[in-house]
Image (tube, helix red, strand yellow):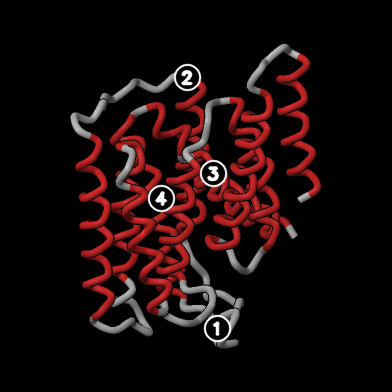
Amino acid sequence: MAVTVAAAVLIGGGSLLAGSDDWLTLGFRAAAGAFLAWALGRELDPDDALSAGIAAPLGALGVLVGPPDLASAAGALMALRVVIRPTGHRPTIVDEVVLVGLGAFLGLRIGTWPALLGLAIAVAWDGLLPRRAGRRTYAVSLLVIVAGMLTALGLGEPDWGWIGPTVGELVVLAFGVVGAVVAYSTEHPASVGDLTGEPLNRQRLHMGRILGAGMALAAFAWLGGPGIVGAIPLWAAFVGTAASRFRSEER
């Protein structure tokens, strides 16, 4: 994490020296993007902390391309935790209330609607994957969507338009997609649930990686270039997972 903090400080400090009056916001985004990239990396590759270690500075440096969508990244993180289930336990009633509240929050901006959809899918999948949750999870999934739709009604006429990506954004997308493809194959995880001590389920980890890539691609399909930039913490996590795998094969 020291590298992450250093990257955030360099970005914020560099913009200050350049005369930017928004250096504090830029530094915050760099730090938040780094943390979310790190957390997403831990979910996508729980067996190797190096993946998250690589993802964190990439998430910080991503602000040089554009501002990450922190709400969408947080939504993706929660979705992955539901599907992969790193604790070993299904969501509690309190967790489900939080998920519905997050769904309502993600409905507030049109740019976070792909994350809203991904979160609802994750909750529904929790009732289909091994060690399945109870039937209540389907009602919670529906409530996540309904809560998001209700808050979306307050937007009025949404200001939406697909914006063509820049060359830099296309480069980010290319690296991210390659990382997701490399990370696609899932070996039996050696990690265990934080609370149960039982091995994590391979199919859940596999589907979590598919869901994460799908959410990032959905953001691009929905928004264009801004969707690529917004999903940089997630793409950074995939690149970190792929880079870690290459390094492991070289040993």
Give the residue at the far front of this rendering: 154
Image x and y of residue 140, in percent: 27, 70
Disc 4 and disc 1 in contact, CB within 8 angstroms: no
- How many numbered badges does the structure rendering display? 4
Is residue 176 rendered to the left or right of residue 38?
left
Q: Which residue is mark 3?
A: 233
Instruction: Please state which amino acid type lies under the numbered disc 1.
Output: Pro
Q: Residue at x 32, y 53 (%)?
A: 104
Place residue 146 in its image quadrant.
Answer: bottom left
Q: CA distance from mark 4 to mark 3?
A: 12 Å
Q: Is residue 33 above or below residue 13?
A: below
Q: CA distance from mark 1 to mark 3?
A: 27 Å
Q: CA distance from mark 4 to mark 1?
A: 24 Å
Mark seen at residue 167:
2
Q: Secondary structure at mark 3?
A: helix
Give the residue at the far top of this rendering: 19
Place residue 208 in its image quadrant.
Answer: bottom left
Q: Which residue is mark 4?
A: 213
Q: Secondary structure at mark 4?
A: helix
Q: Which residue is mark 1?
A: 199
Q: CA distance from mark 2 to mark 3?
A: 19 Å
Q: Residue at x 33, y 82 (%)?
A: 132
Q: CA distance from mark 2 to mark 1?
A: 42 Å
Quadrant containing the C terminus in the rendered view: bottom right
